[in-house]
Image (cartoon, rainbow, N blue to C red):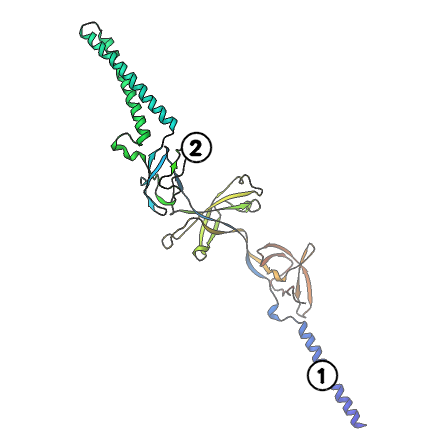
């Protein structure tokens, strides 16, 4: 009997120990490790926006011709550096048939008129020798003859210009198109033997070459109507160029278009920014993709918490704090600016509160 009593006591003690172990285990499981508890902190919150655009020359000049013709010779290639006055192409005139025919008719007409006036003048000279012609009549005859001669010479020059592109051997350079600025040839859309049209008020003319100043680059991109109000002239911008191993350059917004592009369903506005590109160490290339980053809003030295501690319920935002007794306390908070990682807390928390993560049961 005594032995059975001792066994009962031992079994009871064993169950008691097991129960204590289970209770302690459950209690420890419900306690959040101190490492996982969050704390508000005084920090800076920045809201950033990113848009993609292109790295382009600030100045590009399209070279065109004032006369129509055929490309007889190219003097440059794409990528060549040119100065103002550098020959680009030589043209062989190719006048329109109607224009050429009119020039020939004009030369023929003025030649006949000059011949007739020359005959009249010669007869008057003979009459004058016999005393039958006054001095004033002879001056008028010489004047008329000179006018007809000038008209004939002008018609000759016009026809020669249409056929040769220059008036005499010393003016052969007149049919050579030269660069009007210094830079690099970025486009050369014409080939030898190709016909080009002249530039006039009714026609833009054929682009012979594009010369760009690659020593001054700009960022050009587009923003939607929802972002354009956050971008101001003079705002600093960070530009990331992936082609140069994510090279980062600083820049300043220099243009925000006052009007959206026409013909698009979504209102898009053009923007431009200067680019502080390291020309001394890198070879600049036009047309590269650039990602521009803007700081559209910023708060400094404010109370912040990480997003993982915020609970959203209907229109309310709250956090769960842990008391010294390991009790959960629900607190409503008022938030301010957020960058997606941390959020400004306007009211409802102190810097000494300990926060429970939203994913902890």
Task: Measuring from the top left, give residue 157's x and y in whole percent.
Answer: 29, 26
Query: Sequence-wise, which precedes: disc 1 or disc 2?
Result: 1
Report how far apart the C-alphas of labels 1 and 2 lie in the structure: 100 Å
Quarter assignment of residue 164: top left
Q: From the viewer's perspective, tell me whether residue 335 is left or right of residue 232.
A: right
Of the 4 image quadrants, the one containing the C terminus is: bottom right
Instruction: Tell me the mark number nearer the camera, choosing from 1 and 2.
Output: 2
Q: Which mark is residue 350?
A: none
Q: Which mark is residue 203?
A: 2
297 up-or-down from 172: above or below? below
Task: Measuring from the top left, give residue 66's x and y in whole percent.
Answer: 37, 33
Of residues 248 and 163, the one nearer the viewer is 163
Is residue 144 visible in the rendered structure shown here?
no
Q: From the viewer's perspective, tell me whether residue 349 is left or right of residue 52.
A: right
Of residues 293 and 146, the one nearer the viewer is 146
62 up-or-down from 158: above or below? below
Q: From the viewer's perspective, tell me whether residue 289 is left or right of residue 80.
A: right
Task: Measuring from the top left, give residue 179's x and y in whole percent.
Answer: 34, 40
Task: Measuring from the top left, give residue 197's x and y in whole percent.
Answer: 40, 34
Task: Please rate how many residues cluster around mark 1, counting C-alpha atoms within 10 Å: few if below 14, some from 14 to 19, many from 20.
Answer: few
Q: Which mark is residue 17?
A: 1
Quarter assignment of residue 207: top left
Q: What secondary structure is marked by label 1?
A: helix
Instruction: Identify which residue is drawn at 29% across, 21% down.
Output: 152
Q: Residue furthest top?
A: 132
């Amino acid at each position: 009997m005594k032995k059975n009593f001792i066994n009962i006591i031992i079994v009871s003690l064993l169950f008691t120990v097991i129960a204590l172990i289970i209770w302690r285990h459950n209690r420890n499981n419900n306690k959040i490790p101190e490492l996982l508890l969050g704390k508000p902190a005084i920090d800076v919150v920045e809201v950033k926006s990113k848009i993609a655009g292109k790295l382009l020359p600030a100045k590009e000049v399209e070279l065109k011709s004032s006369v129509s013709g055929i490309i007889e010779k190219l003097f440059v290639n794409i990528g060549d550096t040119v100065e103002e006055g550098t020959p680009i192409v030589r043209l062989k005139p190719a006048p329109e048939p109607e224009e050429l025919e009119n020039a020939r008719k004009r030369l023929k007409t003025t030649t006949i008129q000059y011949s007739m006036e020359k005959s009249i003048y010669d007869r008057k000279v003979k009459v004058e020798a016999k005393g039958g012609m006054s001095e004033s009549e002879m001056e008028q005859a010489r004047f008329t003859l000179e006018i007809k001669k000038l008209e004939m010479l002008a018609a000759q020059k016009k026809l020669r210009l249409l056929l040769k592109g220059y008036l005499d051997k010393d003016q052969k350079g007149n049919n050579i198109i030269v660069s009007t600025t210094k830079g690099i040839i970025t486009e050369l859309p014409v080939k030898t033997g190709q016909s080009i049209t002249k530039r006039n008020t009714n026609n833009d003319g054929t682009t012979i070459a594009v010369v760009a100043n690659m020593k001054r680059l700009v960022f050009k991109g587009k923003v939607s109507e929802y972002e354009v109000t956050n971008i101001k002239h003079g705002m600093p911008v960070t530009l990331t160029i992936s082609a140069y191993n994510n090279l980062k350059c600083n820049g300043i917004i220099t243009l925000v278009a006052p009007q959206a592009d026409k013909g698009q369903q979504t209102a898009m506005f053009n923007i431009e920014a200067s680019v502080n590109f390291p020309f001394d160490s890198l070879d600049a290339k036009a047309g590269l993709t650039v990602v521009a980053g803007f700081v559209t809003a910023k708060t400094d030295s404010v109370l912040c918490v990480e997003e993982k501690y915020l609970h959203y319920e209907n229109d309310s935002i709250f956090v769960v704090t842990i008391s010294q007794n390991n009790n959960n306390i629900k607190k409503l908070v008022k938030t301010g600016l957020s960058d997606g990682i941390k959020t400004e807390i306007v009211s409802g928390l102190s810097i000494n509160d300990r926060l429970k993560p939203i994913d902890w049961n």
